[in-house]
Amino acid sequence: LNGGTTAANIWRSFEVASNTLSTGLTTTNLPATIGTDSDIMVLDELYTPFDMKPGEGMVKGSFTYDTGLSSLTATAAGASTLTGQASGGDAVVAANEYRNFQIRIVQDTTTPGAVGQRRIIASHTAGASPVYTLGSAWTTQPSASAKYVIELPNLILLRSTATTTVYTYNYGDATVNNGTNSITAGAWSTTYFGAAPAANASGGVWMPSFGIQPDTARNARHSFCYFFRGGAATLDVLDIAGSITGTWTGAITYDGSTTLTVGTTGHYSPFGNEGRMFYMNIYTASAVSQIFRFDVQNRVLSPYAPTDFLQSGGATIGKRMASYAAIDGTDTYGVVLMQSHLSTVAQELVVLV
């Protein structure tokens, strides 16, 4: 997403497998001007907690499907409902803990045509045998013993400067519908999630927390999406399951305090440290570049490691960090990459997990 006046080709996608850049995608419902330091957060169905495999969702099940992936198993189904397990798995969920997430049917030997369907959860009861009410009815109703997973909803959330709006993009191939709001495939919405408590200044960053496992009291949840306001040390959180349009809580308490400046950038690393760490570089002119990390489970911000970059001149805005998991024999490493402000040089931060 390029910064500047909204125009054709400002919003595009890149297909990695075919090395292809798309033509311009829709800009309807985007602001007239995109702040160059806008930050995007992706909520993809393949993003899972640190101890789960892609395709297993957010809640650990004891049943298997496909090539040994874990799943949950239903105990009842209706035209627009699904009932979960009486014990184990999702029998421990809190009421509406996974509202606005999706249910995906992964196996159904009784009704094979139900497999592959995705529906947004409009609400659900607490376990045991939680009843999930869907935003729209099944096309093919699953059987009462279908296997399913609970996943993130395949949406992109955008915050831009000088606005409180959460711009939400549906990059899936079908309409998402939570029973109140919907977004067609390949479209933006300004109302799917509610407005933030304050406008963002330059340097704001999103921090998801899908990589953790919630504590028993559910003080930390997969639905919590943190946002550090630019130009301040203020931390807000959007709980996408807090209501049908999510619930923002402004200026929450956290341990540690550092003002985010123009040029701040960061990236979530869900692979190690129990999925808790978001790495962040805060620009300070004429100083060695410092990496901070924010613990999204315990809400702690702390300095982590200096880099070899001496930052000088004007801050470079935009996304300059990325992360990936590297496996070397029996060891797994979380690798964080950061590009310099003033050159094409990049530096690696390697964390043994």
Image (cartoon, rainbow, N blue to C red):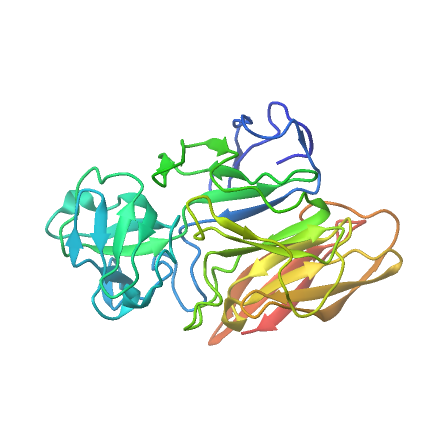
Q: Is residue 225 left or right of residue 77?
A: right
Residue 191 placement, left or right of 255: left
Tell me if I can see residue 20 in this picture. Answer: yes
Q: Is residue 150 above or below residue 26?
A: below
List x then y, in percent, for residue 237. 57, 55
Classify the position of the N terminus by image quarter. top right
> Percent x, y for residue 135?
31, 41
Number of disc labels: 0
What is the x, y in percent for residue 101?
38, 50
207 with respect to 233 (left or right): left
Q: Depth check: 31 or 274 in front?
A: 31
Quarter of the figure with residue 31: top right
Which of the 4 image quarters holds residue 233? bottom right
Closest to the observer, 269 or 33:
33
At x 12%, y 47%, the residue is: 111
Vertical side of 335 occupied by 41: above or below? above
- Name the residue: 27% across, 52% down: 132
The front one of 114 and 195 is: 195
| Residue name at image x 55 percent, y 60 percent | 324
